Image (cartoon, helix red, strand yellow):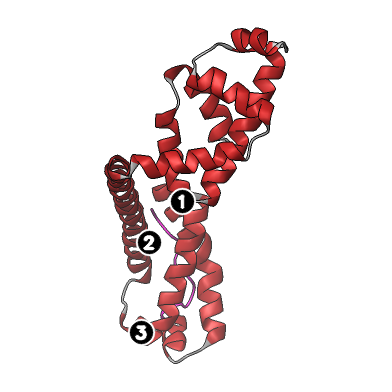
Amino acid sequence: MAVEQLLNEREILLQIADGSQAAFAQLFKHYHRYVFAFAKKITHSQELAGEIVQDIFLKLWLKRETLGTIENFGAYLNRTVRNTSFNVLRQLAHHAKLNLKLSLAQTELEESTNKELDYRETKRLLSDALDTLSAQQRTVYRLCHQEGLKYAEAAEKMNISPQTVHEYMKLALKKIRFHFKKNGAGYQILIAVLFKFSLLLVLAGYLFGS
């Protein structure tokens, strides 16, 4: 990407090398739009391009003593922008790959840990959670979960509407969720194991919902 040379550039670079902030301001004013445009062209990101501008000019100032030795500053700047931009992209790709590996490793660890957790301890926590429910909520939970009745069947048995059964179950699951969170979020996955397949959609909406 071509860049127009700054007038009296050699002299300005020598002034910067001697510590002239005014000369550096001239350099920045002339080249910062070019650096931003070139970095954005490579990264396709306005945010990254802005960070690259700051990074490059900060390094130019910190290494200002070497500017006087540069014969072709335009070519130097072009190469610097290109290298910095590609380094940023490589770092992002590396971080994304690393995060994916960490996520997979964490998932494997959680699955392994969940399998090794004491089932009786999990049932104890669930039992404690059920003690926090009202009598009606506990009855609905027992009928729909433990006995496997549908909402309509539980409603008929309790002499209430299916909608009321649904509301009782919703409240019950929220209370159970709260109790398990209070005692350790790691047990949330195990709660799902305790529920039958027919209730997994309910769990997704109410037990694990924010």
Density class for disc 2 (Cα within 10 Å; few <14, some 14-19, many ≥20) is many
Q: Residue at x 51, y 80 (%)?
A: 24
When the figure is inspected, residue 8 is found, relative to residue 153, above or below; the finding is: below
Q: Which residue is mark 3?
A: 68
As drawn, is 117 to the left or to the right of 149? left
- Marking on residue 81: 2
Which segment did they paint magenta? 1-10
As drawn, is 202 to the left or to the right of 61? right
Q: Quadrant of residue 187?
A: top left
The residue type indicated by label 3 comes to Gly
Q: Residue at x 45, y 35 (%)?
A: 191
Earlier-in-chain disc, 3 versus 1: 1
Q: Are marks 3 and 1 in contact (CB under 8 Å)?
A: no
The residue type indicated by label 2 comes to Val
When the figure is inspected, residue 127 is found, relative to residue 38, above or below; the finding is: above
Q: Residue at x 62, y 8 (%)?
A: 152
The answer to whether residue 51 is magenta is no
Density class for disc 1 (Cα within 10 Å; few <14, some 14-19, many ≥20) is some
Task: Between residue 6 and residue 53, name the one nearer to us.
Answer: 53
Task: Between residue 99 and residue 184, name the one nearer to us.
Answer: 184
- Marking on residue 40: 1
> Please, what is the dominant secondary structure of the magenta stretch?
loop
Disc 3 versus disc 1: nearer the observer: 1
Horizontal and vertical percent for residue 92?
Answer: 36, 53
The answer to whether residue 5 is magenta is yes
Q: Quadrant of residue 157?
A: top right
Earlier-in-chain disc, 3 versus 2: 3
Distance between mark 3 and mark 2 Cα atoms: 19 Å
Task: Between residue 10 and residue 28, name the one nearer to us.
Answer: 28
The residue type indicated by label 1 comes to Lys
Horizontal and vertical percent for residue 33?
Answer: 53, 60
Q: Is residue 210 visible?
A: no
